[in-house]
Amino acid sequence: MAVLLTGGAGFIGSHTCVELLNAGEDIIVLDNFSNSGKEVIARIKEITGKSAMLEEADILDEAALRTVFGKYQIESVVHFAGLKAVGESVQKPLAYYTTNLSGTLNLLRVMDEFDCRRMVFSSSATVYGTSTDVPFGEDTPTSATNPYGQTKVVLERVMQDLYASDSRWSIVLLRYFNPIGAHSSGLIGEDPEGIPNNLVPYIAKLAAGKLPKLNVFGNDYPTPDGTGVRDYLHVVDLALGHLAALKYARGGACCEAVNLGTGAGYSVLDVLRAYERACGRSLAYEIAPRRAGDIAECYANPTKAKDLLGWEARAGLDEMCADSWRYARRAYGV
């Protein structure tokens, strides 16, 4: 019996693959490589000494999914595959609704057909919308301010309704906060194409000399230094959260939403200073106007993850940035 990782060659998927292989799981990675490279699969083997089976396919291709489920005995799915850039989702809403909604519905139908009803789903703290009631607990009302976030809100509801209709399902909805960092080996990490949308990959390119400066959007928020505060957690801690969620889902029927975060907030300037310590030099930045839709603070109440899954984040900000820089130096030849 095996665990299927859709989007398993991506940033979070590849780190989760490493942790599941290290835990003795048999893994099938399904990926269309639209935002990842096949070299990641070889690097996972280099890190773990173990091989994941690979299927190059798209979750929009229901026939291909059916072929994969017919080929292997799959007992659980960890579902990462989908489009994930907030800004791009505003520009390309149809692509996001098609890939994230239709692709996931295809997957759920095929899982049901093959009597595989155990799912760990990659959700997001974007489901908390513009709420300012920090820290966010799982009972915070959900909403969305962009198509990407809306797909997560809708898919959570789909899975909740699915479980309500058929209690044979075991589903854990993992609401990620802000994963950063990289594997300590420096072999896998986050390397988005073009100009990164997220803070730490942007700073990594800045530190590597690929970008001239960081624009800090707003320094007049009601936070300690005026810049926005977010809950950053190490991607390896996040990967271990998936292992804990999978173990929980194997315990019986459920449909639980669980935050994965540290419960602490770091400002934009906190992150910049930590990265300066990691790379050993000052990094240029400039204060820019606030971006529409940004909130002052966003961080988790992680109590449920500890109580239900026995999981809590361990790494601090300096470790996260040091691991990110180690990977960036390799990726950018610094």
Image (tube, helix red, strand yellow):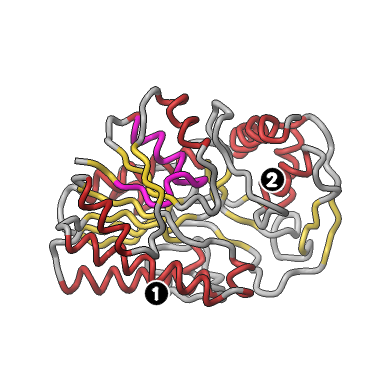
- Span colored in magenta: 4-21
Circle 2 packing at 10 Å, graded few (<14), some (14-19), many (20+), is many
Helix, strand or loop at mark 1: helix
Is residue 16 one of those drawn in magenta? yes
- Most prominent secondary structure in the magenta stretch? helix
User: What residue sits 36% from the left and 50% below the top?
Assistant: 305
Q: Is residue 154 left or right of residue 110?
A: right
Helix, strand or loop at mark 2: helix
> Residue 123's spot in the image, x, y percent?
42, 60
Q: Is residue 192 above or below residue 108?
A: above
| Residue wearing tag 1 | 154
Mark 1 belongs to which amino acid?
Val
Q: For the residues carrying marks 2 and 1, which lies nearer the camera in this image?
A: 1
> Residue 307's spot in the image, x, y percent?
30, 48
Say the numbered circle drawn on residue 139: none
Say the numbered circle drawn on residue 271: 2
User: What residue sits 57% from the left and 39% below the top?
Assistant: 189
Is residue 115 one of those drawn in magenta? no
User: What residue sits 73% from the left and 65% below the top?
Assistant: 221
Circle 1 packing at 10 Å, graded few (<14), some (14-19), many (20+), is some
Q: Is residue 52 left or right of residue 254?
A: right
Foreground residue among 51 and 174 = 51
> Residue 321's spot in the image, x, y percent?
64, 37
